Amino acid sequence: MKITNEHLISRDLSWLDFNSRVLEEAEDKMNPVIERLKFIAIFANNLDEFFMVRVAGLRQLKPDAVSSDSAGLAAKEQLEGIRKKVTSLVEKQYSCLNNDILPELKKANTIILKWTELSDDEKGNLRKYFQNQIFPALTPIAVDSSHPFPIINSGAIELAVRLKESGSNRTVQSFVEVPLVLPRFIPVASAQYKDARCYILLEDLIIENIGLLFAKCEILEVMQFRITRDMDLTVDEDGISDLLVHIQEKLLHRKKRNVIRIELIQKKENIAFEEWLMKKLELDENTRYYVPGPLHPANFFELVAKEARPGLTEEEWAPLPVNGIDEKKTIFESMKKEGLIPIFLPFQKFDPIVRLLEEAAEDPSVLAIKQTLYRVSGDSPIVKALQKAAENGKQVTVIVELKARFDENNNILRARKLEESGAHVIYGISGLKIHCKSLLIIRKEAGTIRRYLHLSTGNYNEKTARIYTDIGILTTDPELCSDISALFNVMTGYAAAPERWSKIAVAPYDLREKFITLIDREIRLSDKHNPGRIIVKINSLVDNSIIEKLYEAAYAGVKIDLIVRGICSLKPGIKTENINVVSIVDRFLEHSRIYYFGNGGNSEYYLSSADWMPRNLYKRIEVLFPVEHPGTCKILKKILDLELGDARKGRIMGKDGIYSATAPLGNKNTSSRSQKKIYDYFRPEPSP
């Protein structure tokens, strides 16, 4: 069949709908107030990245150009729709922050004060603090014939200052950046609120004392603003002799990329200074967004960390031990005994993965370690273990993806450390991102070679392992190990992909075809008495060929449940009731990808690093791997059922593409909250 625009939603507008659901968590008064503030910061951070990448890409196109938009909209149509939605969402964001969350925080004795609310003594104390702790870090930058207009940093709060020089009627301009390296929330010992934890915003403190930076000048006006630049790092690898050097050069030029958004605090008085700034930055009206302030609410993560205390935050869900891991034995011994050990993050601990590498680094029987790294933390224990292994003479091969968006610089630093330790570092395959998550350890045992494998839906990052839901398996399955060994040869050398893998499917070689085959099988086996069944849990659904096949299956009677956290270009319910789309936004970021196919009663489960997006199917190395262990399959089905029944944090998409609470259970029934129920499911039964 051929789908039409009736079946589809614009990719970027769908992403904004996802961020709207994030904002709903900030508006939800059943969430503790600091958790609500956290979602305000997440919403703002998400929006920054959206402008830096998606809006930036659209603005580079001709207005009538049709981009990769799934619904076939021209660039101009998308930008108009984006601006309308963003304006509405940002208005809701600031209304929630200023009229709801901050007053609730005040009731809880956490208060952000204005300068005018301070006593003379408090102002005096803060001036001393300003002179000692802030003034030395500030640099006023003049704009005149001797000082060209400066390069304004993306993302920082900037103060544009209009002033008169001493002994002159000449009006001049200058800039002062609010340093990101300083705390945004400055503690205040308030006499009026003795029992409260009070703060003043760093930019407010700077503005009130900015005259100290311009001795003997008259300050006429201070205007806060913040710009967002095009930060997408698109790399055409043809003709590049050294990818690492090329990306380093690209990173250096990011400061000069085009400005695609300017945020200003709206004022009613003369806006001539604002127009001067717009002209100097060469910006058009469509880049200008007004907010009531404060700017850069993503910085509220700092306040979230400072004020995270009982009563204002949710109780901690401490990661639980992984079943099958014997703390008294090596990970290798546990893997040999169990055959397959699943790890469900962040409900369970990430520690076994770190332990596996640390043990491998010191184990004299380990000959080689091969691993892919997409995003790792700044002080990664994974990287340290790999370094140690290389220093101990193991054959260590690490594929570091230099093109991991916003982590390019971090990955370059990690790659260099690994190289210095003696590891072989590979920077991927030309034209493809290495996005699969694979770790293969080769060990010599009793004169034979044995392989140990870890595959996962998420990154080797101990920090995100505490906040992202991901699923991995530790296994000694010979066929899986053989497949991944062959895949590493493809990624590190010139080996061609096998004509047929034993168990896995790999993008860009046969992953899309595998999905199509699995859906076709459901169509073929479906009948009135035993309809086909598909349940998919992914981050994004954009690929039109997959959407067409899903609709074909639905029209053939296959029952389809899609748990899609973010972008979903499929609009359900077009001449069928067989497609259900659910989105869950909760304390953990839903990141695992689970694929379930009924197979006529012989259910099959797959896990993957891949979503149903063109980039995952055609432009990345991705792996789909089966889960055949009965106990693990039972757990996967339990997770899917709990998420489909989530009436607390779940939203269901209607035929119009609009999400609402999971009616008819949309009464915010806390007992159905899937993430809490999943955590409780893994929690050991208390001892009698």
Image (tube, rainbow, N blue to C red):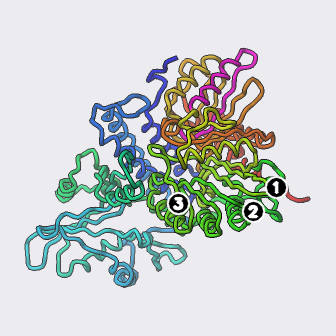
Residue topped by disc 2 = 365
Does 458 appear above or below 688? above
Q: Which amino acid lies under the numbered mark 1 shown in the image of this protein?
A: Pro
**Residue furthest toward the right?**
688
Rendered image quadrant of residue 363: bottom right
Question: Where residue 553 sits: x, y (%)?
Answer: 61, 21
- Tell which of 455 and 150 is nearer to you: 455
Q: CA distance from mark 3 to mark 1?
A: 36 Å
Q: Tag 1 or tag 3, which sits nearer the N-term? A: 3
Q: Is residue 667 visible?
A: no
Looking at the image, residue 136 lies above or below residue 644: below
Magenta-colored stretch includes residue 360: no
Contact flag, marks 1 and 2 (Cβ < 8 Å): no
Residue in the foreground of this view, choosing between 504 and 3: 504
- Tell me the number on the disc at residue 684: 1
Q: Nearer the viewer, mark 1 or mark 2?
A: 2
Which residue is found at the position 19% from the left and 56% from the top? 280
Q: Is residue 321 above or below residue 678?
A: below
Secondary structure beneath dot 1 equals: loop
Q: CA distance from mark 2 to mark 3?
A: 59 Å
Residue 147 lies, in percent from the top left, at 16, 69
Q: Residue furthest top?
A: 528
For the residue marked with disc 3, what is the amino acid? Glu
- Horizontal side of 577 relative to 17 (left or right) equals right
Q: Report the magenta residues as a range.
A: 512-540
Circle on res. 104: 3
Q: Nearer the viewer, residue 645 or 604?
A: 604
Q: Quadrant of residue 512?
A: top right
Q: Earlier in the sequence, mark 2 or mark 3?
A: 3
